[in-house]
Every structure is written in C-alpha cells, then in structure tokens.
Amino acid sequence: MNFVDEKMDSRFRGNDRVRWVDATSNAGTGQPFQTKTPETPRQCLGFTLIEILIVIVIVGIATVLATANLFQTEEEKLQQESEKLLSVLQIARDHAAFGGRVIAVTFSGNEIQFMERDFADPSRWNPSANEALKPRKLSDTFNAELRVGPAPATSKDNHVTFLPIGVAAPFELWLRATVGSRKIAGDAIGNLRLEKV
C-alpha cells in the first residue's frame, strides 16, 4: 500500500456503514488490478419508500371498506326497517294462523303494538305474550301510515287484524322517509309483500 492508500484507509476505517475491500495488494501478482469498492451493508436500517407506500395503500383501502359498511345511507336504513317490519307482520300472521288466535297490530304514531283477543272475553284485547311480538318503536326519521281497505285509516281503525284464516281486511302500510317510501301490502288471505314506491 502506498501513502495515499493508507490515508484513504485510515479515513474510512472508523465508518461502520461502509467497508472497503483493498484489492490493490494483488498488484504485481499477475492478477488483474482491482480498486477499492464499497460493500453493501448487511442490515437495512429503515423502510424503503415502496414499503411505506404499500402500507399506506392497504390502510387506505381498509378504511374505505370499513367506512362504507359502518355508515348506512338513508335509503338502506329505510329498506332495512321495512324488511324488519314485514318480518314482524309475517310472524304475527303465522302466530294467528298456527295458534288459532286473533291478533291485532295497532299503529299509534311511530309505535307498533301487538294485541291478542282474549278467549274468555272476545271484547277484550291483551298484549301479545309472544317474545317476537313485543311493542316496537320506529325511528323518528320514518313516518308510518296505515290504509285499511280503500281509504286511509282513521283513528278508529288504525289496526290490522290477523285471523286464523287470514287477514280480516286488505291493508297497505306505508313507511316514508325523505329519500323514498316502502309499502307493505296485505291481501284478504294473508299474503304480505314489500314494494319500493
């Protein structure tokens, strides 16, 4: 090694990140001359830009998917509430048909109650003992309107009666919100259907 190589060696010797290979000692041995070249470090001391960008993209996609599933639109809430209401009305109809009971579903504002006719006193109505037919309250964002027969229901006939043989009178139950409406229609033999209006 000459004087310049010694100076260069001593200058880079304290640096742990770059190690130099001294290949000048091969000079005069008949082997090709090589210069000092830095070796790559064996340990990575951080993340690459690509790795960071991939993580950011994955977190962004997960956030978008979680947000889309957590926050329902008003249209989805209306559809879900309508399907729940249809399901409860079907349970009331089936309970009347298979249990041999007369069940009335009453609507008072946004509150729904299920009443059973007393066997001993037909003029008396009792709250339903069935767990699925407990009183329910609709969300304040929805407005329920009942039409029994051809005209809108009055305060006297704000109920639907399910008999063991079917529905006493055809009805339409409208569930309205600012984004749209849904209609649950029942015919005289107890068929129920949900329609988007």
Image (cartoon, grey):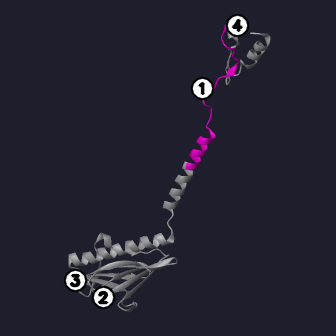
Pointer 4 or 3: first along the chain: 4
On the image, the x and y values in percent for residue 160 come to 33, 84
Please state which amino acid type lies under the numbered disc 2.
Ala
Q: Which residues are magenta?
A: 28-57
- Residue 42 numbered mark, or none: 1
Res 120 seen here: yes
Q: CA distance from mark 2 to mark 1?
A: 84 Å
Q: Which mark is residue 4?
A: none
Kind of element beneath mark 3 = loop
Along the polypeptide, which appears first: circle 2 or circle 1?
1
Spatial CA distance of label 3 from label 2 is 12 Å
Let me know if residue 64 is in the magenta part.
Answer: no
**Residue 107 in the image: above or below residue 78:** below
Q: Nearer the viewer, mark 2 or mark 4?
A: 4
Residue denoted by label 3: 165
Per the image, label 2 sits on a secondary structure element best described as loop
Seen in the picture, residue 87 relative to 164 is either above or below; the reply is above
Local secondary structure at mark 1 = loop
Q: Which residue is mark 2?
A: 169
- Considering only order in the chain, which callout, 3 or 1, is on the residue closer to the N terminus? 1
